[in-house]
Every structure is written in structure tokens, then in C-alpha cells.
């Protein structure tokens, strides 16, 4: 589990890179990726950490293990989407030209 100090460093560096980095917040995918990363951290801190704290006390598996697996699946999906956005960097595609190029004989 990440310490609160490390979480603040991760969030801060992500915000700094998103605002001042080469891509900036001009691209929608940067903002979506940043929100996904914050969602991963929040899911771990708010939902998964309490389940893990209570895990040693439980003698048998309870209903919380199903919730734990579902939350791990949600986190994994958010991480996969953020990774795909980081690798492919989707941008708006320029409009297709319908007229012929200038300067070419034809």
C-alpha cells in the first residue's frame, strides 16, 4: 500500500507533467489519463485499503473478498485504458481534403 506522502508525490508530478509537459491539457486524452490515474489511487485508498486492513481478522472468506476482486478488476481496467492512451496518444484527425492539391498539373 502506498504511503500518503508517496501518493501526494505521484499526484503532484502527474499534475505538473499534465499542465507543463509537451502535451499539456490541450489534448483530451491527457486529462482522461490523469483522471484515470487519480481514480486508481482513490479506489485503492478509499475501498481496497479498508478491506486489506480487516483481512487478517477474518477467519474465513467473507463477502468482502468478492468486492475486493471486483475493485481489483476496476483498477486493472482503468490502468489498461490509461496505458493505451499513453501509448497511442489519440489526437483529432485533420479533415480530409475534398479538392485536388494545388500546383499539380491535371
Image (cartoon, grey):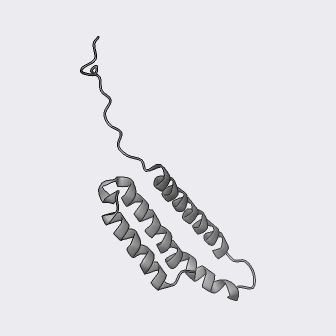
Give the residue drawn at x 57%, y 76%: 48
- Left or right of 32 on screen, residue 44: right
Q: Is residue 104 left or right of residue 88?
A: left
Front-lying residue, 17 or 55:
17
Give the farthest residue toward the left. 102
Picture coordinates of residue 30, whole percent (x, y): 38, 58
- The residue lying toward the viewer, choosing from 103 and 53, is 103
Q: Residue at x 37, y 60 (%)?
A: 31
Residue depicted at 32% across the width and 37% down the height: 94
Residue 30 is left or right of residue 6, and the answer is: left
* Res. 1 image quadrant: bottom right
Is 99 above or below relative to 24? above
The percent position of residue 71, horizontal first and vertical second, equals: 58, 68
Q: Quadrant of the C terminus?
A: top left
| Location of residue 74 by image quarter | bottom right
Residue 15 x %, y %:
36, 69
Front residue of 91/101: it is 101
Q: Is residue 76 above or below residue 10?
A: above
* Residue closer to the observer: 57 or 90: 90
Amino acid at each position: 500500500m502506498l504511503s500518503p506522502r508517496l501518493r501526494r508525490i505521484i499526484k503532484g508530478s502527474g499534475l505538473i507533467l499534465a499542465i507543463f509537459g509537451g502535451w499539456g491539457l490541450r489534448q483530451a486524452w491527457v486529462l482522461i489519463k490523469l483522471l484515470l490515474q487519480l481514480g486508481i489511487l482513490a479506489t485503492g485508498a478509499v475501498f481496497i485499503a479498508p478491506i486489506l486492513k480487516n483481512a487478517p481478522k477474518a477467519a474465513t472468506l467473507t463477502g468482502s473478498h468478492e468486492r475486493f476482486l471486483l475493485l481489483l478488476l476496476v483498477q486493472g481496467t482503468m490502468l489498461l485504458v490509461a496505458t493505451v492512451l499513453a501509448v497511442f496518444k489519440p489526437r483529432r484527425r485533420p479533415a480530409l481534403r475534398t479538392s485536388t492539391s494545388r500546383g499539380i498539373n491535371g
